[in-house]
């Protein structure tokens, strides 16, 4: 019985490897013409973000929030962006400095849980 399982998972592994090998270029071709969209990845823990400052070019910015520890949400002061828990939001941002704040009362460090977003 064990041998069957080992053989099956080995076969699966081969299939996965084969599937990944062929399409390196395929996903590059379908950008939707916006050109300037950029992404900010925030990783939240108790009670800080993984960077003090995030810098992006002006234009459409997609912000992704991941909660690695605890439960946090964010808002970007001065921009129409808020994420409750994990998720993402997209906004068109003018150049300037924005403050990213945690919006969910998450414990003793909540009040100082901030990061800076610099849009250039
Ligand atoms: Cu908080």
Image (cartoon, helix red, strand yellow):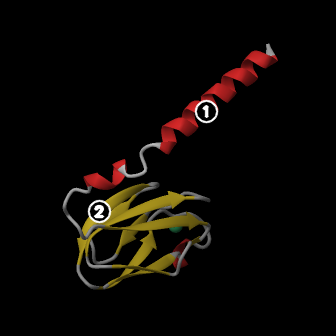
Give the mark nearest the N terminus, 2 or 1: 1
Residue in view at x 19 percent, y 61 percent: 33
Ligand 1: does it lie within 8 Å of the C-beta at label 1?
no
Q: Quadrant of the N terminus?
A: top right
Residue in view at x 51 percent, y 64 percent: 105
Residue in view at x 64 percent, y 26 percent: 11
Image spot of residue 109 (x, y percent) = 60, 73
Whether residue 57 sits left or right of residue 104 in the image: it is left
Q: How far apart are marks 2 and 1 (CA)?
A: 38 Å
Helix, strand or loop under label 2: strand
Image spot of residue 110 (x, y percent) = 55, 71
Q: Which residue lies furthest to the left in this view?
A: 33
| Relative depth, front residue between 116 and 95 | 95
Residue in view at x 49 percent, y 37 percent: 19
Whether residue 15 sits left or right of residue 116 in the image: it is right
Find disc 2 in the rendering and name its residue.
90
Find disc 1 in the rendering and name its residue.
14
Whether residue 111 sits left or right of residue 35 in the image: it is right
């Amino acid at each position: 019985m064990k041998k069957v399982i080992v053989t099956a998972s080995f076969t699966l592994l081969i299939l996965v490897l084969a599937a990944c090998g062929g399409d390196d270029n395929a996903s590059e071709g379908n950008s939707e013409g916006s050109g300037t969209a950029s992404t900010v990845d925030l990783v939240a823990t108790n009670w800080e973000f993984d960077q003090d400052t995030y810098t992006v070019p002006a234009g459409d910015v997609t912000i992704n929030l991941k909660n690695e520890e605890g439960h946090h949400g964010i808002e970007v002061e001065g921009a129409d962006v808020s994420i409750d828990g994990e998720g993402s939001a997209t906004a068109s941002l003018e150049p300037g400095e924005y403050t990213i704040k945690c919006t969910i009362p998450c414990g003793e460090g909540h009040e100082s849980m901030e990061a800076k977003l610099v849009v250039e």
